[in-house]
Image (tube, rainbow, N blue to C red):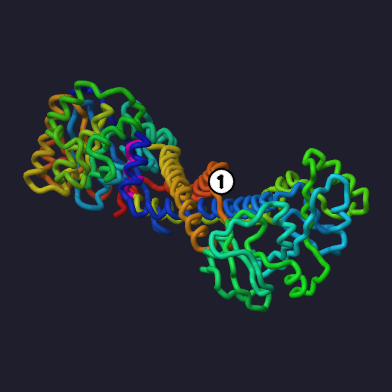
Amino acid sequence: MTDSPIISVRDLRKIYHAGDVDVHALRGLDFDIRRGEFVSVIGPSGSGKSTLFHILGGLTPPSAGSIVLDGNDLVRMSDAGRTRLRKKTVGFVFQKYNLLPTLTALGNIEIARYIAGERGPVGPEFERLIDLLGIRSRLNHKPRSLSGGEQQRVAIARALVNRPAIVLADEPTGNLDTENSMAVLSVLRDLNKRLGQTILMITHNPEAAAYGDRVIHMRDGRIEPPGLAV
Amino acid sequence: MTNKLVFENLKHRPVRTLLSSLAVGVQVTMILTLVGISHGMLEDQAQRARGMGADISIRPPGSSAIGLSGNFDERILPFVARQPHVALATGVLIAPTGPLTSITGLDFPAFARMSGRFRFLEGRAIQNPGELIVDEYYAREHKLHPGSQVTLLGRAWTVCGVFEQGKLARIIAPLDVLQRLTANSGKLSIIWVKLDDPARTNEVIDSLKRAGLADYQIWSMEELVSQMTPNSIPVLRTFTAVVIGLGVVIGFLVVFLSMYTAVLERTREIGILKALGASPGFIVGILLRETALLAVIGTFAGIALTYGSRWLIMNLVPGSLTQTIVPGWWPIAGAIALAGSLLGAVYPGLKAARQDAIEALAYD
């Protein structure tokens, strides 16, 4: 872990327009995440954590504030710029795994490399990651033949294949039983400790959040000071 | 990798792939069958004209190679027969019996001298005024054999023989009987002329025109046959263009529906690709490649179906329609299918490309 922030967020705001009503999803967030940190963001439904996930992942632009991710100013970024950001700088792990059902596990990993413009063979580092995730024997299976835990580990491999600056995980254990949840969380922590992978995990589960180095509590679109967090 | 994704997408939904390809295939078959029938009918007509064994054909003024403007006085026949280098001349009368069929009145002894006798597969030559002969295709379509009764031109005929196809016409009756029956006594529709030296064909045609037949359509057999192509018949060209237009519209609608459904069905997958950094161009490209593959599969299916349609036509209605396989039109029909299909994929492709990634990922 280094002290230089890989994510720097200042006064981040997001307003959704639902008809005539403005919904303030984020009401001025300020935080930094250092390179190599494993940060959990916890909060109840409607606290704004998914919106934060979408903005950090370049899936939607913020309404105001400043947000710098690995040197990229997301506020000034165009749609095309955010698309480029998603190719290499950010890796996603979703609650519902979100693997393409038509491709095998390996195909799902390869398509992420292909979209990122990577054409050569994967390096030995990634081969070790496959072993670490324990999915080598499952690579030629389609998602429907994999258990939830296996699908999520494939999704983690896909998120890491392009060596992103940060992995964003949105409720990665939300669809898993306790055993598989612990396995996935252990893998994430392992990746963070062994490879120094920066991870920001969103969860509503305090036990899952405890796997992180640090926990950010959110409520009503704001970050709660540590002392006030429930 | 893109091709792998395209291929897997099509493989993943086999029924949709099969139905879409089949629909494109029907469009291709429609075009190829029409073109095949146009070529087949004209080639068949040309083959039967060649089977006459003549060197020159004389038709009434204003006639075309495939259509007659009327009949003319049969006294022209002996005039033609007297011309230098004319070895033999014989006239026929053609009376339509339906949109695609006609009965031909023939002077049998003159015909035999010009082109040899008919080769009968069943039965014998005409011996009585109430008899007619038919070729094998007409006999097969109408299940006729010697002794069968047919009603044509308002009277009953007895089939006395079935001859090998390729000679002059499908249904043949004695010339004088047909002239009386159709109130065309003393009239002919075509005069066929055989020369003592075929090399003098142009010379004889010029001399016939100079001798008072300038208004008549006088063609060498080569000229006549060369006009029996779809391109030389404006109505057929227009009809083909209409069918091609319909084909494009069908291809467009089929692929539009198929791809529109696919985009709705794959909303989440599109969201995943977007989350991975896929550009709008990449997503449109995937759909267009899928469409192109469907069109290619459909084209092959359509070509195969054309053999099926030819089999059906040649077995069910060989006396009315003739279809040939025209490989020269395969790439044209394929290109038409591809164009219609790609047009149909444009809107669904743009819809997919414009999809909001967050909404797409939340789609169940």
Residue B6 is at least partly visible in this image: yes
Rendered-image quadrant of the N terminus of chain B: top left
Toward the left, the furthest residue is A179
Expressed as whole percent of the image width and height from the top left, the position of residue A81 reads 41, 33
Instruction: Magenta stretch: give its range.
Output: B268-277
On the question of residue A95 being in view, the answer is: no
> In the rendered view, would you say A175 is above or below B151?
above
Please state which of residues B359 and A139 is positioned toward the viewer in this rendering.
A139
Q: Residues within 10 Å of mark 1 (few under 14, many from 20)?
A: some
Q: Secondary structure at mark 1?
A: loop
Of B16 and B129, the residue lying toward us: B129
**x then y, percent, for residue B14:** 33, 51
From the viewer's side, name the closer residue of A129 and A225: A129
From the viewer's perspective, is A116 left or right of A42?
right
| Residue bearing the label numbered 1 | B326
Q: Is residue B295 left or right of residue A217?
A: right
Quadrant where the image shows the C terminus of chain B: bottom left
Residue shown at the point (74%, 62%) measured from the top left: B107
Residue A1 percent coordinates (x, y)? 18, 23
Question: Looking at the picture, does residue B95 appear above or below residue A104?
Answer: below
Please report the residue visible at 81 percent of the width from the left and 42 percent of the height from the top.
B201
User: Which amino acid, mark 1?
Assistant: Val
Res. A197 image quadrant: top left
| Residue found 69% across the figure and 73% down from its top | B129
Quarter of the image where one finds residue A131 = top left
What residue is rendered at 90% in x and 46% in y? B207
- Indicate whether residue B47 is drawn in magenta: no
Return the x and y of residue B190 as percentages of the image width and height.
Answer: 78, 58
> Horizontal placement of B263 versus A208: left or right?
right
Determine the chain carrying the residue at label 1: B
- Tell me if residue B269 is in the magenta stretch: yes
